[in-house]
Amino acid sequence: MFYVYALSSYEKNYIYVGLTSDIKRRIEQHNAGKEKTTRNYRPFELIFSEICNSRSEARTKEKYWKSGIGKEKLKKLRTTLK
């Protein structure tokens, strides 16, 4: 089982989309600064996650959420959560 997830920075206007098989560990890694790409945007909150049956399905969905349309939907979701 894989997860596609989106994290929103508390302090900056930044949304990160990724995939993992262990979502709890992955969020902890991002918030601990262990990931170079997200280190400067900490701390994060989880705004979206989706369960996928395979890595290839998760990768397809990750690409969608990273696209222009997907990012716009995540921005709208983020504003409704605040």
Image (tube, rainbow, N blue to C red):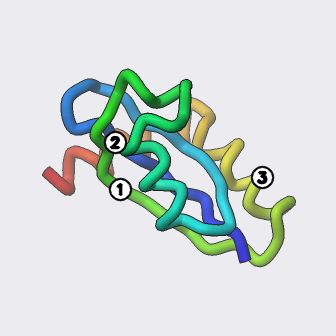
Give residue 3's position: percent from left, percent from top: 62, 66
13 vs 24, left or right, is left
Foreground residue among 33 and 8: 33
Q: Please tell me which residue is depicted at 21% across the width and 45% down the height of the picture.
A: 79
Foreground residue among 29 and 51: 29
| Kind of residue at disc 2 | Ser
Real-space Cα distance between discs 1 and 3?
A: 19 Å
| Kind of residue at disc 1 | Ile
Real-space Cα distance between discs 2 and 1?
A: 6 Å
For residue 30, above or below residue 19: above
Task: Give the residue number, with chain letter if any, for mark 1.
Answer: 47
Task: Give the residue number, with chain letter if any, for mark 3.
Answer: 60
Q: Are marks 2 and 1 in contact (CB under 8 Å)?
A: yes
Real-space Cα distance between discs 3 and 2?
A: 21 Å
Q: Please tell me which residue is depicted at 54% across the width and 34% down the height of the picture.
A: 35
Looking at the image, the residue that sits furthest to the left is: 82
